Amino acid sequence: MALLVDVHCHLTAREFEGRVLQVVEEAVEAGVMLIITSGLGYRDALKALEISDGARVHPSIGVAPYDLEGYEDVLGLIERERSRIVAVGEVGLDYWRGGRESRALQQMVFEEFIDLAKALDLPIIVHSRSAGKYALEILSRKRAERVIMHAFDGNASHAARAAHRGYMFSIPPSIARSRQKQKLVEKLPLENILLESDAPVLAPSRDEVNRPKNVRISAEWISRIKGVSLDKVEEKTTQNALELFGLRV
Ligand SMILES: [Zn+2]
């Protein structure tokens, strides 16, 4: 059994309050050796920094595109904590939820975070809901390089073109119930695939609280769809993640 990396989840979520250690332990037992937890907004980012141990759990810091209040403070926090965080994000565009934020504002803020990620030479984890094409356009125009499109819900051929430019796509356990995610995996080379849980959401079945240990379910689906052994999928996705984030186990 190869060691796995969960490149994106939210251990700071209410669902895990008071049992983060247990959830991490359970993931380790399932072979998940590294977890990247994303803090959304200033206060959540502080929590993500607090629960990260720099060994098994590493923080990334971003802001939800549907709730951009105080995003300037998040930019400042990323700069101050550059040495501890492993990525900027998640950040991006959400044209489905939208919230109070206009598309123009979402785009402007997204570009600021892309600029910062580039300036600090950090990978960027991108949320794009009903906005995949637009997010990819902005990233390409800004010449972003170390890119992870997380739970990409857009067109698989757009994704394949972005993979050509070296962009990575992280696949959540909801692939078990999403034809769109299955198609995405069909189109993408294994070289561009990572595993994520996005816990507590995007579980393999609806109404279930997702956990980082479920990245194994993503790996199983990828193995089946691509006709590649599970071992190979585990090894390759872990190697992809370690290289991209510059991490070691
Ligand atoms: Zn997320």
Image (spheres, grey):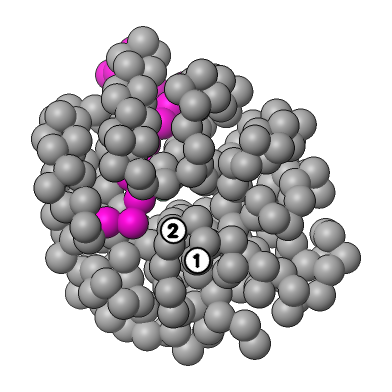
Q: Is residue 88 magenta?
A: yes
Q: Which residues are magenta?
A: 85-102
Q: Which mark is residue 182?
A: none
User: Image height check: is 173 above or below 121?
Assistant: below
Between 40 and 247, the residue placed more toward the observer is 247
Instruction: Identify the residue under disc 1.
Output: 242
> Crowdedness of circle 1 by 10 Å Cα count: few (<14), some, many (20+)?
some
Residue 65 shows in the view: no
Mark 2 Cβ and ligand 1 under 8 Å apart: no
Where residue 193 sits in the image (x, y, percent)? 65, 54
The amino acid sitting under disc 1 is: Leu
> Crowdedness of circle 2 by 10 Å Cα count: few (<14), some, many (20+)?
some
Where residue 76 sits in the image (x, y, percent)? 13, 38
- Quadrant assignment, res 240: bottom right
- Quadrant assignment, res 227: bottom right
Q: Secondary structure at mark 2?
A: helix
Label 2 near label 1: C-beta < 8 Å?
A: yes
User: Image height check: is 97 above or below 217?
Assistant: above
Where residue 39 sits in the image (x, y, percent)? 26, 51
Residue at 17%, 43% (x, y): give it: 79
Where residue 192 sits in the image (x, y, percent)? 66, 51
- Left or right: residue 155 versus residue 3 is right
Between 34 and 67, the residue placed more toward the observer is 34
Q: Secondary structure at mark 1?
A: helix
